[in-house]
Image: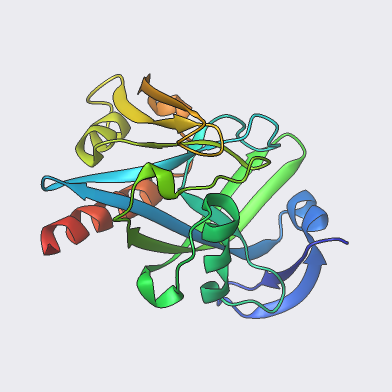
Amino acid sequence: MAEMLDIMGPDLQVIGVADRERVHREGLWHHTFDCWLYRRVEGKIYPLFQLRHPDKKAHPHQLDITAAGHLLSGEGRKDGVRELEEELGLSLHPEELVYLGVHREEMRGEGWIDREHRHVHLHQFRGGWEDFRLQPSEVSGLFEAELSEVVQLMEGKRGTARFQGFTGTEASTGRHEERRVTWDELVPHSKEYYRTVFQALEAQGNQE
């Protein structure tokens, strides 16, 4: 059965419904859910990045938002919390997330145009790697990096940043890795988007 999405106007009002294939083929605006998990260790902030599956049509094997996905027709942003359970195996309530608002983004690839109103959220993760159960068809691994290094990477002030985490579906059976990552290995969201998220992460860190 085709995945049906709400087509959104500029004011986030629903103006129609279309299947996912048509939405991406014609570049119709729709809304999505993003959630960035982060850890706080010794006063430093570590955002978590999922490693996209190599068979993904868009941005295969690149590092991306911790969990993200489409909101189906009739769903609101809070319904997107299911993405955390589907992709990461974490069960959270919408009230546990910090809502940053909506970011409009357009991305293009061969044969697709993705125009999204992204509902962006944060959540401080206080567990360990063993708490994750990754969705094998979507996610190939999970990594973290110190926020200041990632910001410097984005700004071109360093060539690589140190990421560590695991590949596989679970930390206990997967492969633990440390790698040096270049900016090109991250999904090419706009720098405006990344700055919004990174500044919010810094603010969350300063509050604690």
Question: Extreme right residue here?
Answer: 1
Q: How many marks?
A: 0
The residue at 44%/44% (across/down) is 190
**Location of residue 93 by image quarter:** bottom left
**Above or below for 73 versus 26:** below
Which quadrant of the figure contains the N terminus?
bottom right
Q: Nearer the viewer, residue 20 or 13?
A: 20
Is residue 187 in sight in this rendering? no
| Residue at the image point whose x is 57% and y is 29% from the top | 61
Colour scheme of the rendered structure: rainbow
x and y, in percent, of residue 155 in the image: 27, 33
**Quarter where residue 158 is shown:** top left
Query: In the displayed structure, would residue 141 be above or below residue 116?
Result: above
Quadrant assignment for the C terminus: bottom left
Q: Front-most of 70 and 170? A: 170
| Residue placed most toward the observer, 178 or 146 | 178
Give 12 or 168, whichever is nearer the viewer: 168
Residue 124 as seen in the image, left or right of residue 91 = left
Expressed as whole percent of the image width and height from the top left, the position of residue 167 reads 50, 30
Question: Is any part of residue 19 visible from this angle?
Answer: yes
Left-right relation of 17 to 136: right
Q: Quadrant of residue 4?
A: bottom right
Residue 164 drawn at (x, y percent): 34, 29
Q: Measured from the top left, where is residue 137 in percent x and y?
A: 68, 41
Q: Residue at x 53, y 73 (%)?
A: 77
Q: Is residue 172 left or right of residue 58?
A: left
Instruction: Look at 34% across and 61% down and name the residue there.
Output: 123
